[in-house]
Every structure is written in structure tokens, then in C-alpha cells.
Image: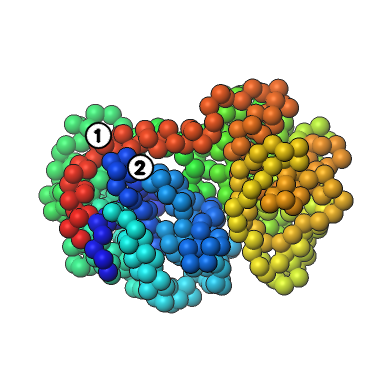
């Protein structure tokens, strides 16, 4: 391999902030004039993004986190940035996406045997990025401390040792026990893996850093690893798309706003960052409703989000009693929007004649739109040039199985690449579309919110994401020993 500079961030556990740190470092180094590429060998997420498959000019899927990191680096996303993506479909099994294309499905135990065959693909993608970059910033998945998964690993130390990339271990002090998590990781790693770690970072620190000096010294005393910085709690990260749906369960509900939007947390929720532009609006309260809770009666709008398993999530939706809540909401004059899988649920039926999603081939929909969805084996993955029917520009992309048709499609929501998409009820209060990113278009969002008597914020959604990335890069510049980090990356 060409020895392009590279550094890898791994964590003592999941959700320690690796995705945000990698995005911030990509923005920091790009601002310094370096050509930077993000890379995550293996990701597990139903929050996917559209990315270019370089050799074909077509599009495939990558994790949404790598899309964000590419944005931070100032480069278009490609499938090489996340060559292996696992999209959970059940409690024990996932769809496998390799370099953007679906290759099959596997249960967890079976995947542990399959993944050894993906290492070469991962290394080839890393090499492709290395050929066009001054620096590659790599994100691990989960934790190297999961030594039960070390055999055939491609996500953490398996990749790092094969590619010769030094590792920075990230600990999250906000969750507690950070000294034990770092020292414990050192204790249980095999010697070869341990030697790959070149230092550690503390993330999400609140308060006076000097109060933790003894803790930092203790970590180095037990591990021999140098400290590379203490990163403060980054409030700007709240303005970035979240990669993992576990974050949604922790979102606090703020003070009442002029518009309340209820979003049921379906089991295989996908591309939930569709709601971020609404969440960012100061006069909008987005309430993610977990199973076991009722849809709030105060909500003027209910949004059914995307789903990786539409039929299974539709059954769970009913089992939770949300179908009755939704019917009552509509009877009160409430509005409903369905996005992608949520759009499919709103129709009369969902059919899966080839068993693409699972053994159930047919399900009754919620019946709020006069349409029917039919699943098809070939997934549609593409960026979209879209407008409203009256010509207003929209932003977005498509990632979905199946097509939808029926009388309500005569009132489309948008025009995608010259073709009508979506459906609207006769009352106009219920609609659905396959377009992800609908609310990211500032003009459309402003007009949509005006229908509820809400004035949208003056600044645009994308501008807010860009400013958040800049703020995070500036915070990392102050908190991390960047010169030492670069020197480690250059020595690989």
C-alpha cells in the first residue's frame, strides 16, 4: 500500500463520540489545506446515505455518518468511505451492503464467518482513498475491547493491524468510569493490538480540565499511552445528523412550542435525520414517541419515518396501539406525513410477493392514502433532482424497495427526475413521499411551516450543519494535540 498518512479513532464502547470527532478532524485538516478522506471499514446503521460508486458512475449506500464526514472534508461521498454496511432487519439478522450494493442477508453468528472474506474489499477501498488523499481519518465501530469478536475482525483492530494504521483510543467521560474503561481495554487486548494504540483522547468533558489531571496521569501510568487531549462537551454536535437511533431515546422534550410534531419510534427506523431540519426550528417541538407511550394529543402533525422493514414495523405499530392514536389524530383534523417506509404504511396494502423483507408477503396498511405499495427485489438508490409540482426546488435522495401506485398518486408531492412521486389525500392533510430530505429545502420548509402558523428560522439547515462543523473543528484545535496527532499519522 502507498503509505498515505492515516490515523484511526476507536472507542472504549459504542456512542463515545467517534463519528463527531472524525467529522471535526476532517473539517480541521481540510481547513488547513490538506486533502482529507474519511473511512469506516464496517458500519451498522439503518441511517444510510447515497454515495457514488466510482467505477460505474451509479449510486450505492453508505452510513450517514460517513456522508457527514465527507461533507466535513469538503469532498463528495463515495462507497469506498464505508465499504461494508450492515442494516439491521430483525433482532438477530442484517442486510449486508458491500461497496454500496446489497449482497445478501445474514444472522449475527453467520456474519462472523462471512466477514473474513470482506477484509480484502475493505483494504482495497482504503487504498483507493489513500491514492487521492494527503490524510485518511478512520473511524472504528463499537470497541476493540469486544475481544469475543476479534477473530476475522474488519471493523477495529483487524483493519488497523492489516493496514498498519495507528489507533487513538477514545473514552467518554460523560458516561462515567472512563479511567476503568481505558485501563481495562489495555488489560484485555492482545499484545499486538495493544501496541497499535498510539495514545488516548478523553471526550465529552464538562467543567475544569485541571480537575482531571490526576486521572489523566493514572491512565498513562497504567497503560503507557500518552494523552492527546481532553475534548469538552461539544454543544454544536446537537446540530449534526445523528448516526445511531439510540440517540433518539435520549432526546429530552423541551418547553412547548407553537408546533408539536410526533414521531413514533418504530423498531427499524431509518434515515431519521429527515426530521433534523424540523428539530432545528425554534418554534417546532419534535417528540420521538417510544413504544409503550401514546401519540400525544397535542401534536398537530404526525410523521411516520422511514423503515428498514415496513411490514414488520407496521405490525408493531398496530400492536402498540398507534393505529388507533393516528386515526383519532386524523379525526381531530391533524396532519400526517409518511416518508419512504412511512409512506408505504399509509396506504391500503403493502405487498411483498418475493419475500424481500421477510416471510410475510402481504399486510393491510393504515388506509389513510388510497395507494398500494409493492416490494421489488431491486433497490432504488440515487440522488434526486426534485421540485414541487409547481416548480419549487427540493433537495434529497431515494433509498427504498418497492413502488407505490393508486388514485391518490394523482396528487403527487414532488417531481423526481421528471417523474411524479408521492401521494396526497383529498383533504390535503395527509401525504407521503419516497424523497428523503424533503424538509431540508429551506423554501419548502418555510412554506410548509407557514401552513401551521409557524415562521421558520432565517438561517438555512445546511448552513447550520456547516457552522456546527466549523465550531467543532475550532474546539478540537484548542483541545487536541494536533501536531502530535499528525506526526503519528505520518509515521504509519
Question: What color scheme is it?
Answer: rainbow
Classify residue 178 as left or right of residue 435: left
Along the line of sight, which residue is nearer the eye, 5 or 215? 5
Are circles 2 and 1 on residues that touch, CB within 8 Å? no
The answer to which quarter of the image holds residue 154 is: bottom left
Q: Please state the horizontal and vertical placement of residue 323, each as a whole percent of the image.
A: 76, 46
Q: Which mark is residue 27?
A: 2
Looking at the picture, does residue 162 appear above or below residue 17? below
Classify residue 311 as left or right of residue 287: right
Q: Residue at x 31, y 34 (%)?
A: 474
Q: Please state the horizontal and vertical placement of residue 122, each as a whole percent of the image.
A: 39, 68
**Figure label count:** 2
Looking at the picture, does residue 137 appear above or below residue 465? below
Classify residue 194 as left or right of residue 155: left
Along the line of sight, which residue is nearer the eye, 491 or 275? 491
Q: Residue at x 32, y 55 (%)?
A: 133
Give the distance between the C-alpha atoms of the residues marked 2 and 1, in whole angstroms: 14 Å
Q: Which mark is residue 478?
A: 1
The answer to which quarter of the image holds residue 427 is: top right
Say if residue 343 shows up in the picture. Answer: no
Say whether disc 2 or disc 1 marks the residue closer to the N-terminus: 2
Say if residue 159 shows up in the picture. Answer: yes
Looking at the picture, does residue 292 appear above or below residue 166? above
* Rendered-image quadrant of the C terminus: bottom left
Amino acid at each position: 500500500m502507498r503509505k498515505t498518512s492515516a490515523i484511526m479513532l476507536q472507542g472504549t464502547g459504542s456512542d463515545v463520540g467517534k463519528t463527531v470527532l472524525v467529522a471535526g478532524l476532517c473539517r480541521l485538516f481540510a481547513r488547513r489545506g490538506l486533502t482529507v478522506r474519511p473511512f469506516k471499514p464496517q458500519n451498522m446503521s439503518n441511517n444510510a446515505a447515497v454515495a457514488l460508486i466510482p467505477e460505474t458512475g451509479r449510486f450505492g449506500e453508505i452510513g450517514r455518518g460517513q456522508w457527514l464526514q465527507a461533507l466535513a472534508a469538503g469532498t463528495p461521498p463515495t462507497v469506498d468511505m464505508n465499504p461494508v454496511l450492515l442494516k439491521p432487519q430483525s433482532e438477530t439478522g442484517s442486510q449486508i451492503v458491500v461497496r454500496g450494493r446489497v449482497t445478501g442477508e445474514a444472522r449475527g453468528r453467520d456474519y462472523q464467518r462471512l466477514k473474513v472474506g470482506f477484509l480484502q474489499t475493505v483494504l482495497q477501498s482504503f487504498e483507493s482513498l489513500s491514492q487521492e488523499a494527503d490524510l485518511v481519518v478512520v473511524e472504528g465501530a463499537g470497541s476493540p475491547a469486544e475481544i469475543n469478536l476479534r477473530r476475522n475482525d474488519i471493523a477495529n483492530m483487524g483493519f488497523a493491524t492489516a493496514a498498519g494504521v495507528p489507533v487513538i483510543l477514545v473514552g467518554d467521560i460523560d458516561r462515567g468510569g472512563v479511567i476503568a474503561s481505558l485501563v481495562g481495554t489495555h488489560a484485555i487486548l492482545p499484545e499486538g493490538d495493544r501496541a497499535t494504540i498510539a495514545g488516548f483522547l478523553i471526550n465529552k468533558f464538562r467543567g475544569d480540565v485541571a480537575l482531571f489531571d490526576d486521572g489523566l496521569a493514572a491512565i498513562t501510568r497504567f497503560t503507557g499511552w500518552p494523552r492527546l487531549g481532553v475534548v469538552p462537551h461539544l454543544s454544536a454536535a446537537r446540530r449534526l445528523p445523528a448516526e445511531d437511533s439510540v440517540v433518539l431515546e435520549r432526546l429530552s422534550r423541551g418547553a412547548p412550542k407553537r408546533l408539536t410534531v410526533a414521531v413514533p419510534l418504530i423498531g427499524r427506523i431509518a434515515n431519521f435525520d429527515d426530521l433534523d431540519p424540523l428539530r432545528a426550528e425554534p418554534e417546532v417541538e419534535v417528540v420521538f414517541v417510544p413504544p409503550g407511550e401514546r401519540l400525544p394529543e397535542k401534536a398537530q402533525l404526525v410523521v411516520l419515518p422511514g423503515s428498514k422493514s415496513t411490514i414488520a414495523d407496521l405490525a408493531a405499530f398496530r400492536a402498540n396501539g398507534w393505529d388507533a392514536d393516528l386515526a383519532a389524530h386524523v379525526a381531530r383534523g391533524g396532519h400526517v406525513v409518511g416518508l419512504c417506509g412511512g409512506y408505504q404504511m399509509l396506504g391500503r396494502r403493502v405487498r411483498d410477493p418475493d419475500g424481500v423483507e421477510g416471510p410475510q408477503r402481504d399486510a393491510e396498511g393504515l388506509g389513510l392514502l388510497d395507494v398500494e405499495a409493492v416490494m421489488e427485489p431491486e433497490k432504488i438508490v440515487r440522488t434526486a433532482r426534485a421540485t414541487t409540482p409547481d416548480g419549487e426546488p427540493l433537495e434529497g435522495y431515494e433509498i427504498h424497495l418497492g413502488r407505490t401506485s393508486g388514485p391518490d398518486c394523482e396528487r403527487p408531492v414532488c417531481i423526481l427526475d421528471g417523474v411524479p412521486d408521492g401521494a396526497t389525500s383529498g383533504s390535503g392533510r395527509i401525504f407521503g413521499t419516497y424523497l428523503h430530505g424533503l424538509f431540508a429545502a429551506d423554501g419548502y420548509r418555510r412554506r410548509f411551516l407557514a401552513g401551521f402558523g409557524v415562521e421558520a428560522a432565517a438561517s438555512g439547515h445546511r448552513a447550520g450543519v456547516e457552522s456546527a462543523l466549523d465550531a467543532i473543528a475550532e474546539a478540537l484545535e484548542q483541545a487536541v494535540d494536533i501536531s502530535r496527532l499528525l506526526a503519528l499519522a505520518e509515521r504509519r
